[in-house]
Amino acid sequence: MQYNYRNIEPKWQKIWDERNPFAAKNDYSLPKYYTLVEFPYPSGQGLHVGHPRPYTALDIVSRKKRMQGFNVLFPMGWDAFGLPTENYAIKNKIHPKIVTERNVARFKSQLKALGLSFDWSREINTTDPSYYKWTQWIFLQLFKKGLAYKKEMAVNFCTSCKVVLANEEVVNGVCERCASAVIRKVKSQWMLKITEYADRLISDLDGLDYIERVKTQQINWIGKSHGAEIDFETTAGDKLRVYTTRCDTLFGATYMVIAPEHKNIEKWKSIIKNYDEVEAYKLAASRKSDFERTELVKDKTGVRLDGVNAINPATGKEIPIFISDYVLAGYGTGAIMAVPAHDERDFDFAKTFGLPIIEVVAGGNIEEAAYTDVAEGKLVNSGFLNGLEVADAKKAMIKFLEEKGIGEEKVNFKLRDWVFSRQRYWGEPIPLVECEKCGWVAVPEDQLPLELPDVESYEPTENGESPLSLMTDWVNCTCPNCGGKAKRETDTMPQWAGSSWYFLRYCDPHNDKELASKEALQYWMPVDWYNGGMEHTTLHLLYSRFWSKFLYDIDILDKSEPYAKRTSHGMILGENGEKMSKSRGNVVNPDDIIRDYGADTMRLYEMFIGDFEQSAPWNTQSIKGCKRFLDRVMNLVDIVSGTGVTPELEKPMHKLIKKVSADIDNMRFNTAIAAMMGTLNTIYDAGKITKDELITFAKLLSPFAPHVAEEINELLGGKDLISVAKWPEFDESKTIDDTIELPVQINGKVRSTVLVPKDADKDAILAIAKSDEKIADSIKDKTVIKEIVVPGKIINIVIK
RNA sequence: GCGGGUGUGGCGGAAUUGGCAGACGCGCUGGACUUAGGAUCCAGUGGGCUUCCCGUGCAGGUUCAACUCCUGUCACCCGCACCA
């Protein structure tokens, strides 16, 4: 039976569209399963073959769960605010809304051509005012609870374009579009206090089924560290506070370093003798990003503050103070005590500047390198700490600091608050007004959504303000509080905002009273299985968990964690093994693949390409194998005869059901397909198959290649959709062979294999092994030292 | 630099988690069918000095047994907070 995918794929897609068998039901008494994939940013390039990999994977999971009787929610939408659309709009003078509509239409038709079982009736779009009304509403709740605040922040500013740039738009320190110098400009920005949730974001990971590397990456990103803050007296008559995780090494602090932005520099201006030099260094540092600054370059740079010294509170000695850009203003107190003997960065700096290196923990060779091991070594040269282990020394030091009132224990996080302002047009307007009398005031909730006004130009303004700031009619307003003169906030939200809660909207996407009804949220949440890229592990995943916890705290959600399970797929690389990108010219368009091989083949290949969690290079040649497999499966329709069980296929079929079911649950799609290929070969060897067996085979195949499965089912007389048929079950006893082939090793090398009954005991197995001709030959005239029999696994005879 | 990960035939990968390394597929070789083959079918396919030996980035170690565990080392990939 030849099959023509160009006819049958559109045919079944149309039928699915009409009958809508994949819509999630609003019957909350059914067992539910919520599968989620990251909704795409609808870029101008359309889908590339990387997109369908995770979509197909969770489509397979969703289809299987439906066939197992679950009420499945598997939705799709568009994360459509963002920079590329805005830049395209600026360049081509087209409204970003139009650009977005176009891109969404293209993406949607491409996704539909893949036969994905999304519930399209729940489609959402973050740029839709009926959606971002609730994004704004959540922001207002954060604002009202004091979790949104304004802070001076450095931003990238192109001196030529007069535009605030994203980090990505800064390439080698210059503007991506005009190659002019980029400076760090200080602006007042809205911030969200995600750091208040830092502890919970770590501890609540405990009960969750996230793959391990996602958990560790989150924990490390949040970066909880235990340490102490210590005050150092200075010769300027004031104090300089540092944060350290190694307060035990205080006796070894031979100098101090403060960040170039540290406020004391301004304060000490009159007593710093080399202020010009310091100022010049500050300027140079302002041109670097944090990333460039912490990158360990060969030579550390810095300038000593001539005229001010600090006093080490442990030794009482005067030590110099430097500014250097390896110390960041945003972490800890923006100042450190430098212990070159036990910190690599301090060691390098001390070597460069010829500063004293004093060993205070024995165990290393500080002539050669800093000794940073905290598990081993005792304190030396450290007064009252001498002889203590590092951990004990830390405790003793904290006690000392607290008694003297010059410091205390302190927990610090690497996690920083979330910069929530963008000086851009294509984002959700921040629904706040600044009143001359009342300060920042929330736009009343009944006035939401605060819609994005139409502007003439999407370019940010001369001074780096958002394009919205030019719309005086829109900006000038009255204060909702006192009725006085007020101005609207003209910054917009980052793209992260809309994606921080979208999974909640899917639960009840058309609700105009609430972001979603309480019942819908109680029923559907949490997401049972969320798959997405590793690149979203630290930002999107953390931001959305943060918002969920906040919504839990204000009683919108009854669970504080949004995702019960999180997995991550590997990237599909170009044929040359490099990341697919337009600039590398190695992008493969799924449209071409669907045209030449069909959607089922494309789906199958993307799942067969390798371990789902690992990246794999695309190879158009290899697709043929998947096409051949589907052709051969279709051909079974011609040899099918009778009903019931074919004796030689009974066990292979039961094994296959078991294997495919387990592999889907464990996201081992590649081996599930390999098993189906193997069984198909067995069927061909047998040369026959019954109708019942072929239908079972089609059911197992249907999550992977749904069009082919539907077609086979129809050809065999099936009236209902196989996509929602009952998933096959297996009989465990029929998956076990009566005899097992066991390898027999001599001295760890396989010399023969023997067939043993499945329930034979060790002695029986050994006897069979020894009666094997080859084995008997090997052990005669030799001394047997040891005999190892692992039933079901192996026999190893050690001889001399 | 910091954090996370990967390394197995010509290629993508598999190996029940310490038990036959290379399942399944691509490619390749030979054959069948054919006017034709970039279709289909059949057989073979890690390497070598082929009763045997070697082989999972590299160097050691533990074990009856190591792709799997331990120590060291090299290479590559992803993220680094205004790309999404």
Image (tube, coloured by chain):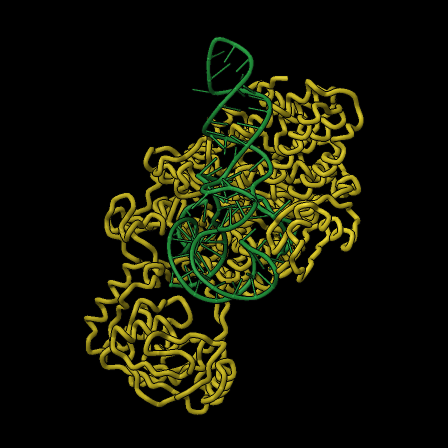
Chain colours: A yellow, B green
A652 sits to left or right of A130: right
Q: Considering depth in this image, is A128 or B54 the residue closer to the camera?
A: B54
Task: Note whether residue A492 is visible.
Answer: yes
Residue with the most extreme front position: A781
Residue A715, image x, y percentages: 70, 19
Q: Does A276 sit left or right of A699 as displayed?
A: left
Up-down: is B23 above or below A798? above
- Side of A114 where A691 appears, left or right: right
Q: How many marks?
A: 0
Is A79 displayed left or right of B24 in the figure? left
Which image quadrant is residue A663 in? top right
Residue A383 at x, y = what percent? Answer: 42, 91
Question: Residue at the location (43% across, 76% down)?
Answer: A244
User: At which x and y percent is residue A640?
Assistant: 72, 21
Quadrant location, the N terminus of chain A: top right
- Residue A564 makes an appearance in the image: no
Residue at 69% x, 58% y is A787
Residue at the extreme bottom: A384
Quadrant into which the C terminus of chain A falls: bottom right
A67 or A538, which is in the foreground? A67
* Coordinates of residue A8 in the picture (x, y in percent): 60, 20
Pick the residue in front: A159 or A289.
Answer: A289
